[in-house]
């Protein structure tokens, strides 16, 4: 047997170490909902980041501001939005590192059933969402949860701001690929599936291909000790004055109470990142004299 080449030996050792690390993490804590890597074959079927050593300093949000609005800014500077405008803001924001929308992923083993599920999802207002274009640009947060680079910085800024105001804010879910979203969507249901089951499920969860979590710009958050996040003190702080404290760091409600046909019922725990610039410029005309908004 010929001796193993150093490069090949290094590649083999690297993947063994990586597998051991993720295996130990799963044994100790179990995979959190929306984990960036949920099973070993994800490295092949849905490449997620790969072995990566996160920098101690996260990148600032992508914006001509180069950083979030200072903590002392007057919240009245932020425009107010209706629920439908919040939804439009996320859909139209020029967010970096997103791919073109690909072919629809499978939901069940029945193509006919999948078509009916997608039709009902569209009726409820769900929209197809893109995946990240380059997973190497993602940023790994805690417990295997990953976000797009500007959203990662915006999350850390929001969490720090909440802490300074006396609130504990935790990240429960972040990026989800198509395969993991399928698991989330089907988890409460028992095969053989009935179409009525999916009509109820669509009130609470997006089918694969339709989740804002696919983009890497959506988060589910919580406050320890509060099962109903809508009643948590930190939610009152976040949502005050049309979500001024969330906007300060580039975040908006993902499914607001007055959002109309938007997919699921309102979800106070889910926020989406659009950036401070998009928030300030949404109501500005394209030919605005504002140097921030005229490109």
Image (cartoon, grey):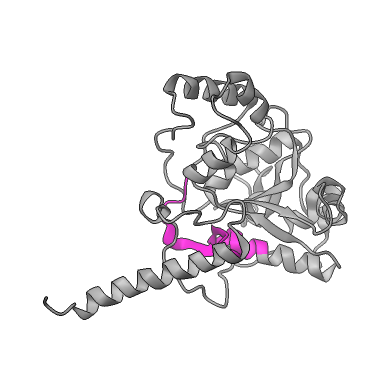
Q: x and y percent of residue 113 in the render?
A: 49, 21
Q: x and y percent of residue 83 in the render?
A: 74, 36
Quadrant of image for the N terminus: bottom left
Q: Is residue 171 visible?
A: yes
The residue depicted at 42 percent of the width and 51 percent of the height is: 133
In the picture as drawn, the residue positioned furthest to the left comes out as: 2
The residue depicted at 81 percent of the width and 54 percent of the height is: 238
Choose between 122 and 27: the one closer to the eye.
27
Choose between 253 and 277: the one closer to the eye.
253
Please tell me in which quadrant of the rendered image residue 84 appears: top right
Compared to residue 49, the image places residue 46 above or below, namely: above
Compared to residue 81, the image places residue 262 above or below, namely: above
Choose between 160 and 264: the one closer to the eye.
264
Residue 100 magenta: no
The residue depicted at 36 percent of the width and 73 percent of the height is: 14
Q: x and y percent of residue 145 in the render?
A: 58, 59
Choose between 234 and 242: the one closer to the eye.
234
Judged left or right of residue 158, residue 289 is left
Judged left or right of residue 133, residue 74 is right
Residue 154 magenta: yes
Please tell me in which quadrant of the rendered image residue 35 appears: bottom right
The residue depicted at 49 percent of the width and 65 percent of the height is: 22
In the picture as drawn, the residue positioned furthest to the front comes out as: 1
Q: Is residue 65 visible?
A: no
Magenta part of the protein: which range?
131-155
Q: x and y percent of residue 26 in the render?
A: 55, 62
């Amino acid at each position: 047997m010929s001796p193993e080449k150093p490069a090949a030996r290094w590649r083999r050792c690297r993947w063994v170490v990586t597998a051991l690390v993720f295996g130990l993490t799963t044994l100790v804590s179990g995979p959190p909902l929306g984990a960036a890597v949920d099973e070993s074959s994800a490295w092949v079927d849905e490449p997620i980041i790969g072995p990566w050593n996160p920098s101690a300093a996260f990148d600032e949000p992508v914006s001509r501001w180069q950083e979030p609005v200072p903590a002392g800014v007057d919240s009245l500077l932020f425009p107010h939005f209706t629920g439908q405008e919040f939804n439009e803001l996320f859909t139209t924001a020029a967010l970096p590192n997103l791919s073109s929308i690909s072919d629809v992923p499978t939901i069940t083993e029945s193509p006919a059933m999948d078509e009916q599920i997608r039709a009902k999802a569209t009726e409820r207002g769900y929209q197809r969402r893109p995946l990240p274009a380059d997973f190497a640009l993602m940023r790994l947060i805690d417990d295997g949860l990953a976000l797009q680079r500007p959203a990662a910085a915006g999350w850390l800024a929001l969490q720090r701001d909440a802490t300074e105001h006396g609130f504990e804010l935790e990240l429960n879910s972040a990026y989800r690929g198509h395969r993991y979203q399928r698991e989330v969507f089907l988890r409460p249901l028992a095969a053989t599936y009935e179409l009525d089951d999916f009509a109820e499920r669509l009130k609470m969860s997006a089918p694969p291909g339709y989740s804002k979590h696919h983009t890497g710009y959506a988060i589910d958050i919580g406050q320890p000790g509060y099962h109903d996040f809508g009643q948590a003190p930190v939610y009152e702080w976040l949502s005050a004055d049309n979500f001024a404290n969330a906007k300060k760091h580039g975040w908006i409600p993902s499914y607001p109470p007055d959002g109309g046909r938007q997919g699921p019922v309102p979800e106070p725990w889910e926020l989406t990142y659009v950036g401070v610039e998009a928030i300030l410029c949404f109501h500005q005309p394209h030919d605005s004299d504002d140097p921030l908004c005229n490109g």
